[in-house]
Image (cartoon, helix red, strand yellow):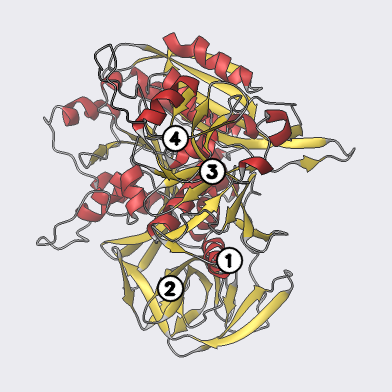
Amino acid sequence: MALQLRNIAIIAHVDHGKTTLVDHLLKQAGTFAKHIAVEDRVMDSMDLERERGITILAKNTSIRIGDTKINIVDTPGHADFGGEVERIMGMVEGVLLLVDAAEGPLPQTRFVLQKALGLGHKVILVINKVDRPECKDGKRIQEVVNTTFDLFLELGATEDQADFPIFYACARQGWGTLDFDAIPKLIAKEQEGSLKPLFDLILETIPGPKVKEQEGFQMLVSNLSYSEYVGRLAIGRITSGSVKKNQRFIRQGVDAQNNPKNETFTITQVYTYEGLKQVEVEELTAGDIGVIAGNEGIEIGDTVTSSADLPPIARIVVEKPTLAMLFSVNTSPLSGQEGEAIQSRKLRDRLLKEVRHNVALRFEETETSDQFRVLGRGELQFAILIEQMRREGFEFMVGKPLVLMQKDENGGRTEPFEKAVLDLPEEFASDVTRIFQERRGMLTKYETTTAVDGIGKQRVRLEFEIPSRGLLGIRSRYLTATRGEGLFSSYVIGYFPHKGEIPHRMNGALIADRSGETVEYALLSIEERGMLFMKQGVKVYEGMIIGEHAKDNDLNVNPCKEKKLTNIRAASAEFLVTLSGIREMSLEKSLEWIDEDEWIEVTPENIRLRKKVLQQNLRSVKRSDRIQ
């Protein structure tokens, strides 16, 4: 009997459990042999994904149920990685929409669901974490189902799409049910559960892949990978025909000016997904998601065909970037001491490599030969790229993220706005509202949720429409204001008239006026002027930022000054004096803190802050002079 196919994507907001659900789907489908030890969140293969608990890159896997192969794509839940989601949606016919039983659908759920519904995909709603304390009476679960249904209608779902099946699950424990009344028994372990009902539901609900009735092979490249043995790998769904090793095919792509460009090449290897592995096969047929090798220049969005007569499939289009960031070679006096001080050519090549893999990022040259501009979606996307390059041993510098402005038909300035959705304890609502309104945010919704969290606090959900500029650096202030108990997410809603000046950082910087090592004696006198970022014994250089000044101007200080020794004892007994407090500056905090005249110096060992102009006699300390 011929192998049947199903192609599905799992979409959800960050931390709603989709990667954990895939773990149990793989285990219960018998993907792993009994003697193989399988770690949790097996789909999160990057170190950064495991550390941060988020999915960054879309990944493929497959399971077999009887004579049916189910290709599964695990997609990111954060809007900053929306480019990953948008290009994956064209590979599948249906989605599992995972929603937290207590939190309900959040902004990134909406963002991805809108893409899936627009393509006409069938949706299975999976209400996950039904064992949470807030859901023990079942009322909150029903509210979440109703809210999700309202979201479907709001996003323009068809009557067929809005009639979605509902599956209640506890992915962490690997069970689920279609019967709402069975949830208490499964939680109490009075009834044994598994994910078998979900397998059956996928086979019933999700249609087989759509195949074009035409002669010849056609595949849209949706993802890229790399093999040390066969080079660049192109991943995509085959829309018609079949492919075998050693066949001659045509890559229909574009050149640097976006003009059509065709290239003939030979397929050197053909792979498919079996579980988490890429397995070499003789042939791939229409409807399957597979991998081909043989062309080093292939890009995401290219179409591979067996004939030049077959037209290319429409290239993948993603939402335009809203932020820009400068990347520069490291020009500090400590360059090359902790990592590889790369030259401009190598930095350019590394950034171009990232842009080729991630269609949500764009690359631009600048007037300065050793500086390059990268355009993207959000601070988190840039932070992940910087951290990856840092772990590869590179030294470089980055500037402040800047929002990309546009002009309307009348020549007026417009800027991107985002809808920020906040879920927080009610007692912090007034402080949070003030923070967002200071950043030109407009409160559009305030609702009290009937659910009370595990600590017994009433929670509220606030929605703000706010300029993207206003969100830069706001996350840490929000978490501080809510004592770490608030949830925060946002998505772009469009471009609107410029809102005017938004306060960023009103304080100046404490700047080292010479090279050397910091001394505790000197730092004790400097900390009276502001907040220090470092302790004693740290290498500094002229122009390096060592703290935040209490006033709005910069202040050049000597952190290397030692106490003069004399043979005269003080009349009063000496007493121990220590530094009162140091603010540790992580990469994310640094991105939030810096101004336009400053760089973040990134090395494998340290994150340093510095002025773009190091010599103190060449730069002004007045804020009005340095921030235009």
- Helix, strand or loop at disc 1? helix
Q: Position of residue 500 (x, y in %)?
A: 75, 26
Q: Amino acid at mark 1?
A: Ser
Distance of label 3 from label 1 (alpha carbons)? 20 Å
Q: Which mark is residue 559?
A: 4
Q: Nearer the viewer, residue 228 or 220?
A: 228
Q: Taking 591 as reference, is 131 left or right? A: left
The mark lying in front, picked from 4 and 2, is 4
If the image is split into quadrants, where does the C terminus sit? top right
Q: Is residue 160 visible?
A: no
Count neighbours of disc 3 (C-alpha within 10 A) and say few if under 14, some if 14 to 19, many if 20 or more. Answer: many
The mark lying in front, picked from 1 and 4, is 4
Q: Amino acid at mark 2?
A: Val
Distance of label 4 from label 2 (alpha carbons)? 57 Å
Distance of label 1 from label 4 (alpha carbons)? 32 Å
Q: Which mark is residue 291?
A: 2
Quadrant in which residue 425 is drawn:
top left
Which of disc 2 and disc 4 is earlier in sequence? 2
Which of disc 3 and disc 2 is earlier in sequence? 2
- Helix, strand or loop at disc 4? loop
